[in-house]
Image: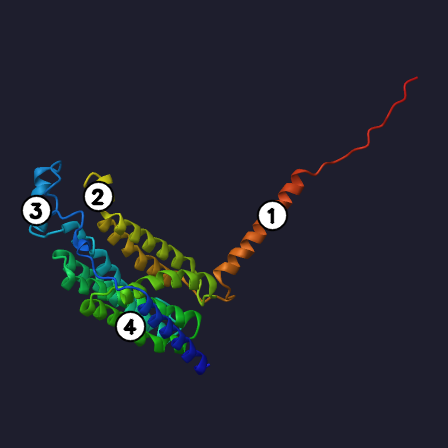
């Protein structure tokens, strides 16, 4: 088994090296920092009452890109709540020590996004962007380790926490020093593919596995909103930008995962979501076929024939 693990890591590293050799570098575009909504809070919404406008200007006056800044607050709240619940008795019902470490890293990353992304949006540039992306890589890589712990092997998953975190940090440093986003792109987007696939194909240890798919769906929606930042800002008549909505949707990811941890129990019959869906579909088809047969069932009775005299 140890040789097999080394073989898998060797193949992964070889694929990464080949990818780096055959693909061109991806520099950080400076247009990335040009967000649609660069307002200070409420200054461009004249329909508010004078009292409300004065109150909001006192609270938020002088904060550039205010909506993009304050929309990071949910990350801090959810991250801190999740971190507290991890150590509040046995609220999260962890059955493995590696789970506790993995989820601790995840919630630290989520809470740190609240600080790092806020710092970046106060003054968007490459230097501050480092502190926005670094916490996100911690959260991404922690999730991969958690999946390995829960669905493949506890020992391997626990051991993988540190290497995966280091891979995320190295991808950020590589981008910053060499202006090449390829390693960071792999760290960010591979989990987007791997996590839903593992959630569907690998048998879960716990119930409520569909929450993983809800989380993945909200993250996908967040990426769409990020790409349509200026378009959404125009569609909403300059009320809210796509990037602000991206923050709110992305914050729903740890919300769903926290709900999953709070509700789940040990799965007595471990089977993948794919197998569960197949069984459900088979039962549905069988029930549907039975209904069709029943609807076409006819009852025949014997009618006496009276001969005419």
Q: Secondary structure at mark 2?
A: helix
Note whether 214 is above or below 138 in the view shown. above
> What residue occupies the far right of the structure in this picture?
309
Is residue 37 visible to us here? yes
Q: Relative to the observer, which residue lies in front, 109 or 53? A: 109
Query: Counting residues from the N terminus, which is met first, the one under dot 3 or under dot 4?
Result: 3
Which residue appears at 28% of the width and 49% of the height? Answer: 225
Instruction: Assess disc 2: are there few (<14), some (14-19) or many (≥20) residues with their C-alpha within 10 Å of its C-alpha.
Output: many
> Spatial distance from mark 2 to mark 3, Cα to Cα?
22 Å
> Spatial distance from mark 2 to mark 4, Cα to Cα?
35 Å
- Which residue was labeled with disc 3? 57
- Which residue was labeled with disc 2? 233
Instruction: Assess disc 4: are there few (<14), some (14-19) or many (≥20) residues with their C-alpha within 10 Å of its C-alpha.
Output: some
Mark linked to residue 167: 4
Which residue appears at 27% of the width and 74% of the height? Answer: 166
In this view, the mark in front (1 or 4): 4
> Spatial distance from mark 3 to mark 4, Cα to Cα?
43 Å
Query: Counting residues from the N terminus, which is met first, the one under dot 1 or under dot 4?
Result: 4
Instruction: Tell me where residue 238 appears, x and y as whole percent.
Output: 18, 41
Q: Relative to the observer, which residue lies in front, 105 or 226? A: 226
Mark linked to residue 287: 1
In this view, the mark in front (2 or 3): 2
Instruction: Tell me where residue 278 appears, x and y as whole percent.
Output: 54, 56
């Amino acid at each position: 088994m140890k040789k097999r693990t080394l073989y898998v890591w060797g193949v992964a590293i070889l694929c990464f090296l080949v990818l780096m050799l055959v693909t061109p570098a991806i520099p950080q575009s400076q247009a990335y920092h040009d967000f649609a909504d660069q307002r200070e809070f409420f200054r461009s919404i004249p329909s508010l009452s004078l009292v409300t406008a004065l109150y909001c200007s006192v609270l938020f006056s002088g904060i550039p890109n205010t909506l993009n800044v304050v929309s990071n607050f949910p990350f801090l709240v959810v991250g801190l709540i999740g971190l507290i619940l991890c150590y509040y008795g046995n609220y999260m019902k962890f059955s493995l020590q590696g789970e506790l470490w993995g989820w601790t890293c995840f919630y630290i990353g989520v809470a740190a996004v609240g600080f790092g992304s806020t710092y970046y949006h106060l003054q968007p540039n490459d230097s501050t962007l480092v502190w926005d992306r670094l916490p996100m890589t911690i959260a991404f890589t922690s999730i991969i380790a958690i999946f390995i712990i829960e669905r493949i092997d506890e020992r391997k998953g626990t051991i993988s926490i540190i290497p995966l975190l280091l891979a995320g940090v190295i991808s950020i440093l590589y981008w910053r020093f060499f202006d090449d986003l390829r390693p960071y792109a792999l760290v960010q987007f591979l989990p987007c593919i791997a996590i839903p696939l593992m959630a569907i194909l690998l048998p879960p240890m716990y119930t409520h596995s569909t929450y993983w798919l809800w989380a993945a769906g909200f993250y996908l929606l967040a990426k769409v909103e990020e790409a349509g930042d200026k378009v959404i800002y125009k569609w909403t008549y300059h009320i809210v930008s796509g990037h602000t909505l991206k923050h709110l949707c992305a914050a729903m990811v740890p919300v769903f995962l926290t709900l999953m941890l709070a509700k789940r129990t040990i799965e007595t019959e471990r089977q993948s979501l794919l197998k569960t869906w197949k069984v459900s579909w088979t039962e549905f088809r069988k029930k549907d076929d039975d209904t069709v047969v029943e609807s076409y069932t006819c009852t025949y009775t014997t009618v006496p024939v009276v001969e005419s005299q």
